Amino acid sequence: MDIIKEKWEEILYTVKLEHELTDVSFDTWLKPLKVHSFEKNGSANTLYILIPAEQQPAFGYIKKKYALPLRVAIAEITGLDCSLEFILPEEAQKLEAKKATVTSNLNECIEKANLNPKYTFDTFVVGSNNNFAHAASLAVAESPGEMYNPLFIYGGVGLGKTHLMHSIAHFILERNPETKVLYVTSESFTNELIEAIRNNNNTATARFREKYRNIDVLLIDDIQFIIGKESTQEEFFHTFNDLHSNKKQIIISSDKPPKEMQTLEGRLRSRFEWGLIADISSPDYETRMAILRKKEELDGYQVNDEVIKYIATNIKSNIRELEGALNKLMACSRLEKKEITIEMAEQELRDIISPDEKREVTPELIINTVAEHFGIRPEDIKGKKRNSEIVFPRQIAMYLCREIIGIPLKSIGTIMGKKDHTTVIHACNTIVADMEKSESTRNTVEIIKKKITPN
Ligand SMILES: Nc1ncnc2c1ncn2[C@@H]1O[C@H](COP(=O)(O)OP(=O)(O)OP(=O)(O)O)[C@@H](O)[C@H]1O
């Protein structure tokens, strides 16, 4: 729509030239026409063109004579093929009233579904770190319940999982506001369940089930938090089965892939692997720049290149922090009524960006981060248990101690609960070999590394 509006004069002049209209015909018939609105319905586009009231008697003539030339010129200039509808001011008013009702209904649905209005595909920047997850999300949005069910999106903190999930939901609701969509964090799901159980009556539990099993699209965020909560896992298992068997779409996000949710109930883990698993990793420099530029555009600001590059160079692993830095500068510039400069950026962002001051990475930090990632206890990593849920994280912790801090094998062995140095060599070799074969192991190690050394 914007491009047609922008190029409208050029479109009209093209028709004039191609059809050799005289100035008087052009001024009488074409020049008064205005772009009113644009409607997209699936792949069909309709452009509404407003004919002023004084042209009403010539309505039929204009439509017959200029509809096709205009359509051709629009396609030539903008590349958009759209059918044209000519309308008079009275119809325009009705159309606006109808659109206002549709928008207000849609806003109601967005609120009911618990969505952030800003998290749409339009505001999501696609880069090499998220293009697969983006494509998978779009495919699910276009055919919910058909292609990939569930869609499981995983990645580190603040990398856009929630934004993508909400984008799917917006897309579905815009196409069909009747769809029953619900976004919920696994924490709210758990709290609602606890509340229903606490009320200790069948009605509350039945209401809970009725709510969650009567949905067309369920989006559940940060599923890792249901690990270890038995009743929640049990309830979610039944909700999942119910929705899935009725071909309702389920979209799940997590900070790690199902395979690594070792302490999650096996039957749930295997269900999460039924559909499509897509990861989001940390954005590269170009994507970080594009995200900052997009944010600046959305907020109507113009920040100089030096400042944008400074932020993009120094904040690497978390998009929430990247945005937060820019927000801080914008707020500061508004309050102090000053332009954003590199000096202001260095001063205001000194708590977030401290290039010379790196967090000290210790074996304890590595052990704690690995344990937290796998939902196990740090003592397990240092302990003697030999089950795979513990051995794999332990091997990763040993590998990272070697890789990040480079401490001697013997010391790693001691820190990891008095293990022999050959055990450490074996662990490091196993992880290196595993990373070569398995993308999932590579991603896991990468995510944990990013948690340990965020910048
Ligand atoms: N590709 C992107 N384009 C534009 N904005 C993005 C992108 N990725 C993330 N963001 C923005 O970064 C912020 C954090 O994203 P989001 O909340 O979706 O992350 P998350 O992965 O769900 O984080 P968490 O693990 O904490 O739940 C949001 O404001 C979001 O709009």
Image (spheres, rainbow, N blue to C red):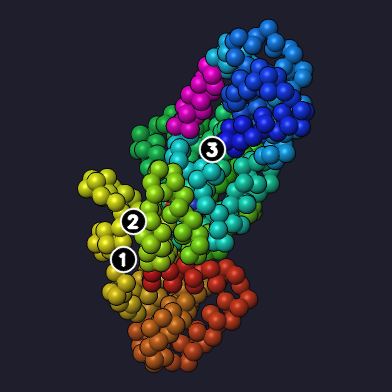
Q: Residue 364: image x %, image y %? A: 32, 76
Q: Is residue 433 left or right of residue 82?
A: left
Circle 3 SS class: helix
- Res. 353 visible in picture: yes
Quick one: label 1, few (<14), some, or many (20+) residues within 10 Å? many
Residue hosting label 2:
325
Name the chief secondary structure element in magenta: helix
Residue hosting label 3:
170
Q: Quadrant of residue 269?
A: bottom right
Q: Residue 361: image x %, image y %? A: 33, 77
Q: Residue at x 47, y 29 (%)?
A: 107
Q: Does ligand 1 reach within 8 Å of label 3's beta carbon? A: no
* Rendered position, 351 above or below 119: below
| Mark 2: amino acid | Ala
| The stretch drawn in magenta includes residue 101 | yes
Residue nearer the viewer, 361 or 416: 361
Q: CA distance from mark 1 to mark 2?
A: 9 Å
Residue hosting label 1:
353
